[in-house]
Amino acid sequence: MNRLESLSGIGQKELEELTLESLPTQIQITEYAKSKAYKVNELVKEQYKSSYEWYGFTIAHIDNPDLIVDIGIGKNADNQLAYTKIGSEAIEEYQSSLEDGLVINGWIHSHGDLGYQHFSGTDDKNQITVLNYVTTLLRKPIRKKEVDVKDLSLLIEGEYQKSDLKKGTVSIVTDKPISSARFYETIMGGFSYAIVIGDEGWHEQEIYHKERSMISGKENLFKVTPESISVVKTDDYLTRKEINALKKEVKEKITPPSYIGYNYGFSWYEKHFGSGYSGLGYWNKSKTKTKTKSKKRTTKK
């Protein structure tokens, strides 16, 4: 015999939920945009004779926001060897520079030749910053969810007294008599892509979803981790003229890290990988040894 732990669920009505549109669970990128991302890696190393983190934005057409068609480099104002940080002002500035019909749908950054092939804690914070901005641009109704309204008061226009409004948790005034009503609130949703790449051709990717209930105001965040990225072939390809322009853009927008970044980076990797870790490019060159001279004591005979 099965024993019921609670009677609260007996007789309760199952609320209906209707799907209107879905948010992407797979990242799509054109071959052109993918080539451009790895070309920036090459140009950073060529420009500064070393490899370190940089960030940019993934760009889509507003009428097809799921497909990344281009990569844009933002002003890398807070770049260090071990991390890069992005602010909402930088996202807004870059979005305003785009042509009509184009929109930021996420961000991309590089770990260069570092051995850490995953998103870091700082990356996670950056992703939320990008998500909060991007969803204001790409938000759309994705579901209708039935709302359970208890003690509903249905009133008819011109036939109720002011005192009747005291009845019920929700009062609805209609122009004609109705016997029942069902309520559905809209759930708005948006997404943002996150991609991290490395000089050796590896990449890792995430998709963040953000949902907001329009009546309650409740927000939920979800993270999807696709196993791969779907590359879409188009007629576009990276030309020599575009590469030369990209080289100039790298020089203007991606500045080399400060000495503070060197110290921070070495300490972080020494903590996680041990003092013998040497996969940080020029980091080990920043370590200097100090020699102390010992004075000889002479005694007079």
Image (cartoon, helix red, strand yellow):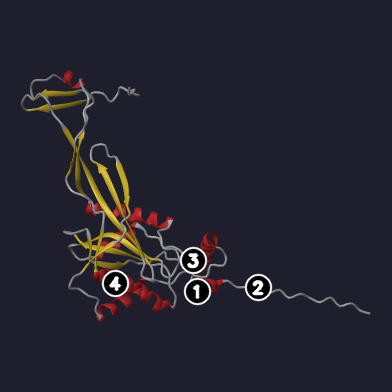
Mark 1 touching mark 4, by CB under 8 A? no
Q: How far across and down, in percent of the image, does residue 39 sit?
A: 32, 74
Indicate the quadrant containing the C terminus: top left, top right, bottom left or bottom right. Answer: bottom right
The amino acid at mark 1 is Tyr
Q: Earlier in the sequence, mark 1 or mark 4?
A: 4
Give the image location of residue 235, x and y in percent: 17, 73
Q: Say what secondary structure mark 4 lies in.
A: helix
Type of residue at label 4?
Lys
Q: How far separated are the C-alphas under marks 3 and 1? A: 12 Å
Secondary structure under tag 2 reads loop
CA distance separating discs 4 and 3: 26 Å
Q: Position of residue 236 (x, y in %)?
A: 20, 73
SS at circle 3: helix
Amino acid type, label 2: Thr
For numbered disc 1, what is the local secondary structure? loop
Quarter the N terminus occupies: top left
Q: Is residue 225 above or below residue 35?
A: above
**Residue shown at the point (21%, 28%) measured from the top left:** 13
Q: Residue 19: percent from the left, percent from the top? A: 18, 44
Question: Residue, x 23% and y 37% (percent of image)?
Answer: 215
- State which mark lies toward you, 3 or 1: 1
- Image disc number at residue 36: 4
Could one spot residue 251 in this view of the protein?
no
Asked if marks 3 and 2 touch (Cβ < 8 Å), the reply is no
Q: Quadrant of residue 180 in the image?
A: top left
